[in-house]
Amino acid sequence: MSSKVQADQFSRLHNLFTFHLGVASGLAWMISIFAAFYAPWVRNIRPLIDPAYAGQVESTWSFLFVFPMVLTIAWLMAISGREIFRHLRMLKNEKIEFGIAGALAFSVFYLSIDRAVTALLLAA
């Protein structure tokens, strides 16, 4: 495959990935902000979710907004590091690399939505 075709394929996959990562980041922020209006603002939200939990203290702010923040940082890094990612190859197939990155981004997006829904259920 010629280098021009590889560059075109990378550009297409990168644009598609950054667009969807941006949409996921925006949706994660919207649902987290919506949940923030209804969730109880406490220093340690974990005992409200699971009374038997005796682990690390986690405030409502960090419970709701840590994953949208991770998505936003990943999105900004993907946009600004385009040329670095073009030259940094872990696997021979770019489609597999973008598939793995997409699966990881979807997992973080899912966890963000799950936490927001959990906080909304506490308010109900």
Image (cartoon, grey):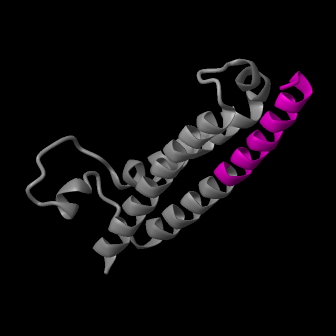
Residue 9 lies in the magenta stretch: yes
Q: Tell me the residue at 54%/39% (across/down).
A: 100
What residue occupies the far front of the structure in this picture?
Answer: 1
The residue sitting at 77% across, 29% down in the picture is 82
Q: Is residue 87 above or below residue 75?
A: above
Q: Is residue 41 magenta?
A: no
Q: Position of residue 50 (x, y in %)?
A: 16, 60
Is 89 in front, or is 24?
Answer: 89
The location of residue 64, given as percent across then percent down, is 42, 55
Prevalent SS, magenta region: helix
Quadrant, the C terminus:
bottom left
Decide if residue 34 is on the left or right side of residue 122.
right
Magenta region, residue range: 1-21
Where's residue 72, x and y in %?
Answer: 61, 44
The quadrant where residue 30 appears:
bottom right
Q: Is residue 118 left or right of residue 105?
A: left
Name which residue lies at 74% across and 21% down.
84
Q: Quadrant of residue 51?
A: bottom left
The quadrant holding residue 14 is top right
Q: Nearer the viewer, residue 38 or 2?
A: 2
* Residue sticking out furthest to the left: 52
The residue lying furthest to the bottom in this view is 124
Which residue appears at 60% of the width and 62% of the height? 27
Image quadrant in which the N terminus is located: top right
In this rendering, position of residue 16 left or right of residue 55: right
